[in-house]
Amino acid sequence: MEDQGKNTTFAVVESLSGWWELAGVDSAVHDNTANLLARDTVDASPAMPTLTNTEKKQAELPVAPAIIWPSDIAILRVMVANGAPLPGNAYGPIRFPPIGPDSCDVMVISDLPNILDSYDMHMSSNATLFHRMLAAIGIETAQCYCTWLATSMPSTGEVPEKDLPDLAAFMLHQIKLIRPKSLVILGSAASKALLGDELMHSRAELRCLHEDGLNLPTLVSFHPRTLIARPAMKKQSWRDLQIFAKEVVQCA
C-alpha cells in the first residue's frame, strides 16, 4: 500500500510538471510573484528628438538683436557713416549719408549716391547735370534733402532687386522723418521700390505717393547717368521737370 501511494504521488507530480512544460514554464520559480495575465505597458510619452551636431551649434548661437531705425535724421546720418547694419548700407566699404537740410519742401530720391559731387569723373558729371536739372525749375540743390536707396555702392553698379522691399521700407521711414511737401524720384529702381512701377510707366505725369498716411505729389524721371549715356532722352526729362514746376513748385 505504501509503495502504491508513493507511485500515485509521483505520477501526480510528473503530470503537473508536464503541464507546466506545455504552458512554457521551464525555469525555476522565483520568490517574487508576477502577474502573467497583465498586459505589457507601453510608454505613451513622445520620444524626444535627437539634435545633430550642427543643430546643437545653431541652437547655442546668440540671437542678434534687431537694429532700431534712427528716430531723427541727425542720428541716421551718423549711423550710415559709421556702417550701421541699415538697409543698403553694406554693399561697399564707403558710405554716403544723405545730404541737405533736415526740413525741406522737396525730397530727391535716387537709387545710388552717384549724383553727389565727387572726384570721380562719372559721379561729378552726374552731379553737374543733376544741379542743372533742378536749377531749370527754380530749385537749388542745397534746399533739397537728397538721399538714395543704397547708401553704399554695389559692386555691380545696380541695386539688387531682391533688396527693394527692405530699401523701400527704410526710405519710407526717412520720408516720415523729413516730412517733405513733394518728392522727385530719379531712376527706375527707386520708382519700382516706392511706386511699384518701372520708370517708363511712372513718368510723364505727376504721381502721388500714398503710404502709411503719406500723400505726396511725386515726379518720376530719368537718372542723370541715363541722360548722359542717352542724350536724346533729355527732351523727355525736360518735359517731366516742367510738369513738376507747373503743378508743384509754382503752387507752393
Image (tube, rainbow, N blue to C red):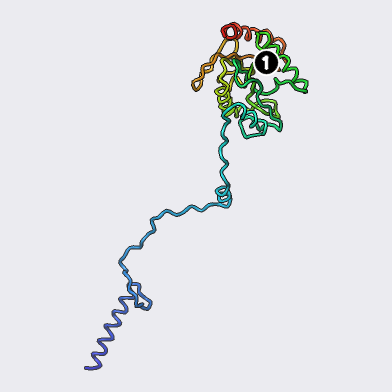
Q: Position of residue 198 (x, y in %)?
A: 59, 18
Q: Quadrant of the N terminus?
A: bottom left
Q: Position of residue 142 (x, y in %)?
A: 67, 16
Q: Quadrant of the C terminus?
A: top right
Please report the residue visible at 65 percent of the width from the left and 20 percent of the height from the top: 100
Callout 1 crowding tier (Cα within 10 Å): few <14, some 14–19, many ≥20: many
- Establish if 147 lies above or below 84: above
Q: Nearer the viewer, residue 97 or 109?
A: 97
In the displayed structure image, the side of residue 221 where residue 209 appears, left or right: left
Please report the residue visible at 70 percent of the width from the left and 14 percent of the height from the top: 131
Q: Position of residue 63 (x, y in %)?
A: 56, 43
In the displayed structure image, the side of residue 123 where residue 108 appears, left or right: left
- Establish if 204 lies above or below 22: above
* Residue located beneath label 1 in the image: 141
Corner quadrant of residue 43? bottom left
Q: Position of residue 164 (x, y in %)?
A: 59, 26
What secondary structure is found at the residue carrying circle 1? helix
Corner quadrant of residue 247? top right
Q: How many marks?
A: 1
Q: Nearer the viewer, residue 131 or 30?
A: 131
Name the amino acid, label 1. Thr
Q: Residue furthest bottom?
A: 2
Q: Residue furthest left?
A: 1
Corner quadrant of residue 135? top right
Q: Nearer the viewer, residue 226 or 110?
A: 110
Please report the residue visible at 31 percent of the width from the left and 79 percent of the height from the top: 17
